[in-house]
Image (cartoon, rainbow, N blue to C red):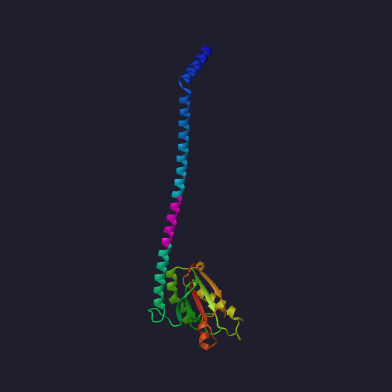
Amino acid sequence: MSSMRSTFGLAVLLLAAACVSPEEHRRALNANNALQAELASLSETQRATQKENDRLRADLDRVGKQAADADWIRDQKVKLDELLKQFQAGGTRQMEGVDLVRTPEGYAFRVLGGVLFSPGRADLSEQGKKTLQSILTTLQKEGKRVRVDGHTDDQPIARSQWGTNLRLSVERSISVADFLIKQGMPADHLGVAGYGEFRPAVDGKGDDVRAKNRRVEILMLDQ
């Protein structure tokens, strides 16, 4: 019985094949190949479209970030220009011996050494503490990282426990930083540096020049 079924099935297949001419079979194969090629082309187009969409999305994100950065830079410039007006000569918050200056790394409060320290000493004077307290509010409001840079004049130290101007400039920076931390500045937002006589604010040898070079700069870092 099983043998009869197999024979009958084969006969049906042969009959079906016999009903399709070679030309029709060839056309069917060509149509199938054309369909497969079209599907492959559509798939490639879809991949290319997705790649272009990803590129456009990345460009849009980049442009958005650049616009946001430009807005931030503009806002910061407006704020700092306003600070300059307040702290520079004639400003509402001007303090004796304190200037707000632009530097390549950001804005800095430049405080004359005579305002903060007695000659040859690294412990803050009472006037120095009051001056720093007045500056502290702005430092906290700006919320930037701060570096305290100490500077001296070019006169060699003759009688002092510090031995060199470089050492004295570092100790003065540390004293200022310690005071700011005790008054509430986060310690991880503060750094110190000392440059001795090697980065003068102004060039020259007179007493007035040396007085300007003896200073501490409290730098609000842009980065």
Residue 21, percent across and down? 46, 22
In terms of image quadrants, where is residue 100? bottom left
Residue 139 at x, y percent in the picture: 45, 72
Residue drawn at 45 percent across, 53 percent down? 58
Towards the viewer: 123 or 71: 71
Nearest the eye: 193 or 78: 78
Q: Position of residue 199 (x, y in %)?
A: 55, 78
Query: Is 59 inside the magenta-drawn segment?
Result: yes
- Total marks shown come to 0
The image shows residue 76, relative to residue 54, as above or below, that is: below
Looking at the image, which residue sits at the far left? 92
Q: Residue at x 45, y 37 (%)?
A: 38
Residue 11 place in picture, x, y as percent: 50, 15
Query: Relative to 130, does residue 78 appear above or below in the rendering?
Result: above
**Which quadrant of the view contains residue 170?**
bottom right
Where on the picture, by quarter, is residue 152?
bottom right
The residue segment tinted magenta is: 54-68
Q: Main secondary structure of the magenta part?
A: helix
